[in-house]
Amino acid sequence: MSIQIDLSSDVAVVTGGGSGIGEGIATMLAEAGAKVAIADLSAEAAKSVAEQITSKGGTAIGVEFNIADPASIEQGLAQVREQFGPVSVLVNNAAAWAIKKFADTSAEEAQKVVDVTLLGTINVMRAALPDLLETQGRIVNVASDSARTGEHSMSVYAGAKAGVIGVTKSLAKEVGRKGVRANVVAPGTTVTPGSSGFIDSVGGADKLAKAYPLGRLGTPADIAGAVVFLASPLSTWITGQVLSVSGGFTMV
């Protein structure tokens, strides 16, 4: 007797899926059987990840998405529907950040972080919601434990991710009775190309890992496992929750 996660009837969209955590999530969703659309600002990166997935027997396409542009999102979702059908799993992972002290962060830099990280997530959820209501789908938004604890030199990013948590909880209350679940995965520091600047700024991976009870930093697969769980039938009575995936760094 065994338990397996089978998402073979699902159509998943992963924003920011062209690298890092998003690539890990897209890959694991495909391994669970989902048809996956890798949505990324870089069409080339999205296509590359999709090709890697299909070469291993999965089903995936790459779609260019600018989540700060509602028209781009609608165009991307139209491609997904044409290829696979309505979306049933939406993973909002794309974000922007500036590693600067608050006083040194310009208005333009702050606006970009908010436009992509918070408003971009809202834009994608709004565009995909008709599909999710039709399919009784699941939303998993990737936030950050910085939204819960704060983070030196990433104040605007932490604030935008806190907004992601707030809007996810609120939406979960609105659509729960319609069969749609919405949850948040909040990673701790995860080793990706995009996090290298932050890791270097605090003294390197070895030094930072000493603050983690499990003794290491995260990997994209660590985050992907939590996302796939929340997208699966194993979590059917879970909504509006924030799951820290942080090696014990955040215990709230």
Image (cartoon, grey):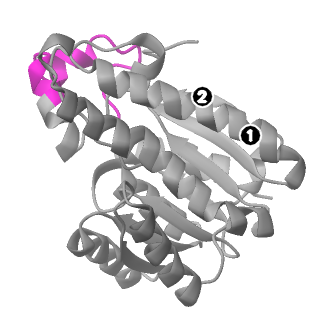
Q: Secondary structure at mark 1?
A: helix
Q: Left or right of 21: which side holds 129? A: right
- Amino acid under disc 2: Gly
Q: Quadrant of residue 17?
A: bottom left
Q: Nearer the viewer, residue 179 or 223?
A: 179
Q: Is tag 2's residue or tag 1's residue first in the polypeptide sequence?
A: 2
Highlighted magenta segment, given as a residue range = 198-218
Disc number for residue 166: 2
Residue 208: within the magenta?
yes
Q: Secondary structure at mark 2?
A: helix
Above or below residue 114? Residue 175 is: below
Above or below residue 49? Residue 141 is: above
Q: Quadrant of the N terminus?
A: bottom right
The CA span between labels 2 and 1 is: 10 Å
Q: Residue at left 30%, top 18%?
A: 155
Q: Residue furthest front?
A: 107
